Amino acid sequence: MSNGNDRWSALKGDSQGSDGGRRYGGYSKQYNRKGYGSRQSSGSESRYNSWDRYQVKTEDGEVLRGSQGSSDRRYSNRVIETKPRWSRFSDNQKDRAARGDEPQVLRKDLDVGDGKGELNPFTGRSFSRNYYRLLELRKKLPIYNHRDEVLKIVGENKFVVLVGDTGSGKTTQVPQILSMKYGKENNKLIACTQPRRIAAVTVAQRVAEEMDVRLGDEVGYSIRYEDETSSRTILKYCTDGLLLRESVTDPLFSKYSMIIIDEAHERTISTDILMGMLKQVVFEREDFRLVVMSATLDAEKLQKYFNNAPLISIPGRMYPVEIKYLEEPVEDYLQATIEAISQIHKEEPAGDILVFLNGEDEISTAVKDLEESLGSVPGEGHPSGVHVLPLFSSLPSNAIQKVFEDPPKNKRKIVIATNVAETSITIDGIVYVVDPGFSKQKVYNPRNRVESLQVAPVSAASAVQRSGRAGRTRAGVTYRLYTEDAFEGLTAMTYPEILRSNLNSVVLQLRTLSMNPVEFDFLDPPPPETVMRALECLLYLGALDQTGQVTKFGKAMSVFPLDPELSRTLLAAPELGVAQEVLAIVAMVSAAPNCFVRPLNKAREADQAKRRFEAEESDHLTLLNVYTEYMIHNNSSQQWCWENFLNERALQSAAKAKEQLERLLEQQGYSTKSKRIGFDYYGQSIAIRKAIAQGNFMFSAVECKRATYLTTKDNVEVKLHPSSGVRTRPTWLIYNELVITTKAFIRTVTQVEGGWLLESSPNYFTPDHFTNDIVSYEIAKLTGERKKSRSAMNTNLRQAY
DNA sequence: GTTAGGGTT
């Protein structure tokens, strides 16, 4: 990769970066920060001011989500006091489990592997002292006294639903108990899925230690890029997405005697699809069992779905957490948050505070406000003031590390976090939780295929999970910045992801397994429109034929852990002689789409750094430039990334993704070498952009007026996102994503020729296919047809020409 | 002429 063509287009000098340090937005209000139930003070429409705004209606008018009644009936409209008044502790049933108030019966120890002097059946050696130390801790877990019940019910049933709250020990103990009995059955193993990589790894480490075996022997884990299992493994923790991928090569999951789906209440797409597939596997395989574990809410729905499966219910156990509600709803939840923190700091005993907000801008503002207002204000037990830390996932890892460290002496630690702190990152020592009750959620509109993020009320399950963060090391208090009535009105569970996502990849996978996505037995069936969209899209991509059967090409596409559009891009590359370049681009787009870091206080420097990589005809080529340079600076990558405002973790994962994709491409019999001979600079750029066009033709846009484009599929008028480096004002563009923020923008774009699009999918690009005259006209120009062109000209819309 | 939260193959 060093023949001088590695860098695309002229690198821009710094001279262009001198447009002054203008910052856009800063702290722009994307939405009104209204607390629950408060009324709009002005007459303007807000999407976020009351519960009944959150309803999502299906095609047939059914309300899928939102409050049962009008917010106006339940919430008062009077002026809210500035200082929140906490209602007295109320004994809410949904909270009881979180507090651990369930009565517990102490029973004598049973006989599963705890006899002293016994030999470890797996290693043949005596148990270590550490084993007995951990065993004492295990005995204190609520699940410990339910071991026979678990063994008995699982023994008698092929479907079992097990619910247990935080602290019940279900994630570590249930798979362990079951693997002692079923782990070697028919030489098959047990898998336990987790929604997150980090959980799969840490739980496996813990369980290996508890079973006194080496990680990777009897107990292991498997996540993308990392497989810590061996032929000895009887219990494997893995991510749900990874297990779902395995179905591509082994649809009956024949390696496993039992699969345990953990955290089913989180309802990830992978978990939902797995549950549907495994339900079928249970009917088809005599020797297979399914256990679904979930937090307590909504267990009935799971039982019903799994043919009235029996339920095992395990109480949670943790330190008690007192829940406080507001007596009246608040007008502005950010302000209320600051006030609540201030009150806690000044009046409540020593202890750290965890606060849940949404997004970097809210968090940064709150951190700044609090440092200014409370930084050195003495509080109860903390005479020197507060130490405030932000926490969100895109933060550099050294900054994340700080939330685990002790604050300066005599200061109270306050962590202002996004949802990462709800499940992924656990901070010990938190005594107070402040929960305004909102989170950002992905919303998918199948009609224009736009995914966007919106701030919406959390589910009751989330609220309970958040409050539980206060009771990890000692008794704590949670301040919910909404009324108890509002809590009662929360939807029980988070709205499942499968109902608000693009399903192209899922539908291809189901078709590859000869399953009918329209009839698939989903726990919550996605809107039929989304499934139809996916089928149509796969047809245009050549993955399915007219009868809906998977083509040979579609079979090859399904092998890659990518969106079908990207799989096709990748498969087009070898023939064009640019396999290496496209592998890197696809890896970047799928694993590091936001690799550019742009801190608000250094926006100008960051923009200048980015310009060094820019290709004027393609942001995809800009990503290739970044990747190539990153690989060159691999041995000093940390500093290099820092200097160039790049996210190192993102680039690392892109590098791993590229390796994996290259291996899969090779396995399919494609050459992964690039052909350099005969290419000049632009020849290569063209070949790469042709490959991008071949997969992404449905994400194409045509210029309709100056600096404005029209997407071909849905006629959305869009502008280039200001972060784009494309300056050539092409007629045709491919875009990677459409985002609607202050305007509709297309982001990560590439100039293409209309002719390439036509070659990519003649079926898709016919003038009649498009309802918009401008699009039809442009396509007619390409195809030579004239059918729609006259009307298009008559509309006099083509001002730009 | 900008702001995307948390996951995953």
Image (spheres, rainbow, N blue to C red):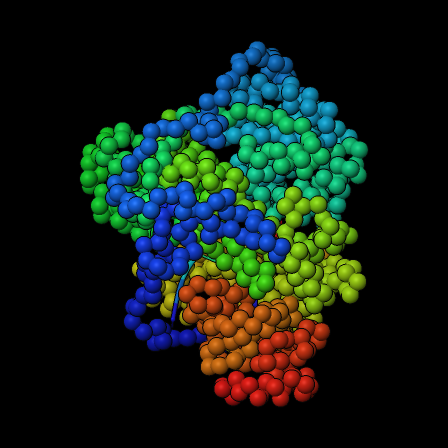
Snapshot quadrant of residue A188: top right
In the current view of this chain or complex, which residue is farthest to the front?
A: A73
Q: Quadrant of the N terminus of chain A?
A: bottom right
Snapshot quadrant of residue A421: top left
Snapshot quadrant of residue A783: bottom right
User: Toward the viewer: A67 or A118?
Assistant: A67
- Tell how many labels: 0
In the rendered image, is residue A610 in sight?
Answer: yes
Q: Is residue A203 above or below residue A581?
A: above
Please provide percent x and percent y for residue A47.
43, 56
Please provide percent x and percent y for residue A501.
58, 54
Q: Is residue A35 above or below residue A291?
A: below
In the image, taking residue A792 as reference, residue A418 lies left or right, namely: left
Q: Residue at x 64, y 64 (%)?
A: A565
Please provide percent x and percent y for residue A68.
50, 44
Q: Residue at x 62, y 71 (%)?
A: A697
User: Toward the viewer: A183 or A66?
Assistant: A66
